[in-house]
Image (cartoon, rainbow, N blue to C red):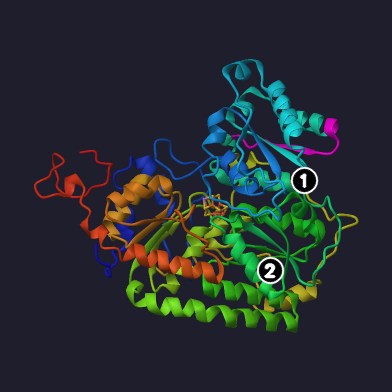
Amino acid sequence: MGTNTHFPDPSVVKEELIQKYPAKVAKKRAKSIIVNDPQIIPEVQANVRTVPGIITQRGCSYAGCKGVVLGPTRDIVNIVHGPIGCSFYAWMTRRNQTRTESLTDANYIPYCFSTDMQEENVVFGGEKKLKQAIQEAYDLFHPKSIAIFSTCPVGLIGDDVHAASKEMREKFGDCNVFGFSCEGYRGVSQSAGHHIANNGVFKHMVGRDNTPSEGKFKLNLLGEYNIGGDAFEIERIFEKAGLTLISSFSGNSTIKQLENSHMADLNVIQCHRSINYMGDMMETKYGIPWMKVSFVGAESSAKSLRKIAEYFDDDELRAQVEAVIAEEMPKVKAVIDEILPRTTGKTAMLFVGGSRAHHYQDLFTELGMTTVAAGYEFAHRDDYEGRDVLPTIKIDADSKNIEELKVLPDPELYNPRKTDAELEALKEKGLEINGYSGMMQQMTKKSLVVDDLSHYESEKLIEIYKPDIFCAGIKEKYVVQKMGVPLKQLHSYDYGGPYTGFEGAVNFYKDIDRMVNNPVWKLIKAPWQKTGATNGKSKGLEASYVTQ
Ligand code: CFM
């Protein structure tokens, strides 16, 4: 498949995507398929229920809570209260890595803890079994903390995981046991689980350890989950720049770090969707401002470091940051100079999660490639259009389902790290404090933005645009590759990574070069594409949604 330089009219593409849907479905999907205009950003329908029957990329609320936010913390025993499948199929598949400081430090990530609910527990209740499981985990590991995650049947039968957790917490005295009502059906996607997880971590962990930490420039890294070692690379850069990472939420983190995180002076947020609630709550309770950053892409990493130095307003830090950038960039440049002629002009599509579809566009820009279409699986309008739209987002029955914590300034620990005047001055310098302007502002005019892309739509998009690479996950990978288009997994990174920071950018350039310039894709022919083949009526490649 050659490089496609002629882009079709996106309004026509939109019509084609929805044409074969029943009228009601077409009407609904039309609101989530948008022709972009970065100057006057159009409204995108997002964070609404998927139409039943449509093959969505989305996951569930439990996945967002247990898998995404809590999963990467290594020394909490995470017990899944539910049937074994919920735990087993979520076990070790996300490639979130961790590194203990010594061989004897606790690391429960390799374990799969489940109450293994059976029919009997569903009929007669599972609380007894849950308490037994908590006791067993305590006796075996003596962990500092045990977290309980509710799966769908738990909510349906009404097991009270919070009461069970409280009872066991009081019984042990030296182990913080707490539960999450993150049943899979709690929201329209895993996004609900992020919110539930943020609430639980904020209520049960943050603020428990007031030990002042060393370091002049103390910050937390929010929304970085150390997939493929991403957090390791950011840690390396922070250390070189003289920044002290108090806690990451939650890649390569520990309970101690999370409990002490309110001692930091800045929160930087990488994945806005999964953790913005934490940024806001810590701002209100402790007076710590947050700033959106991205360490995906060499240029973005440099920009983010400069923003952090600007926030701390210290000349020594500014000089150190510049020294790091000056040292790292030539290595990146040497690689990109070699690769760029081979990747320039190629096209990409990104349909991933709630932040990467935005962040990875920077890496493709560095490769001279154009993102022709992109979208999130489960993000909200603010991730597309920017946080300015927040007051206009309608609360529906699904979002009402999730608790909004009432957070007030802490009577003892509230300490605004910057005065209002200082914050204003920073904003005037162009720093977005407590803000995020979203994905669409950065995308070109007439690129296509699609929320909660369906399987059918993805096949159609590939037929029409013939992109050089499609970025999504394991569920899409082999279907797309059978169409002769390489698919890069941007969730697990296939077997690659890290892709953050300077070293990560180099890894990404090399991996993408290998994929988009591999001649094998041009040689692939599905049986129905071969000469003389017919699927009954028409020849050639067709999306699977064929009614005639
Ligand atoms: Fe944030 Fe993530 Fe993402 Fe996400 Fe995820 Fe993930 Fe993701 Mo998969 S927290 S929103 S729920 S950056 S697991 S590490 S890759 S969908 S784009």
Q: Residue furthest right?
A: 412
Percent across and percent down for residue 228 are 53, 56
User: Which residue is rendered at x = 33% and y = 40% of the image?
Assistant: 22
Q: Is residue 180 magenta?
A: yes
Q: Is residue 3 above or below residue 399?
A: below
Residue 147 located left or right of residue 300: right
In magenta, the rendered stretch is 170-183
Q: Quadrant of residue 392?
A: bottom right
Percent across and percent down for residue 262 are 79, 58
Would you name the residue on which mark 1 appears?
203
Q: Is residue 80 above or below residue 278?
A: above
Q: Nearer the viewer, residue 532 or 319?
A: 319
Q: Nearer the viewer, residue 261 or 197?
A: 261
| Res. 268 visible in picture | yes
Residue 520 located left or right of residue 275: left
Q: CA distance from mark 2 to mark 1?
A: 24 Å
Amino acid on which the number 1 mark rests in the picture: Lys
- Mark 2 vs 1, N-terminal side: 1
Mark 2: few, some, or many residues within 10 Å (few <14, many ≥20)?
Answer: some
SS at circle 2: loop
Would you name the residue on which mark 2 appears?
433
Q: Quadrant of residue 162?
A: top right
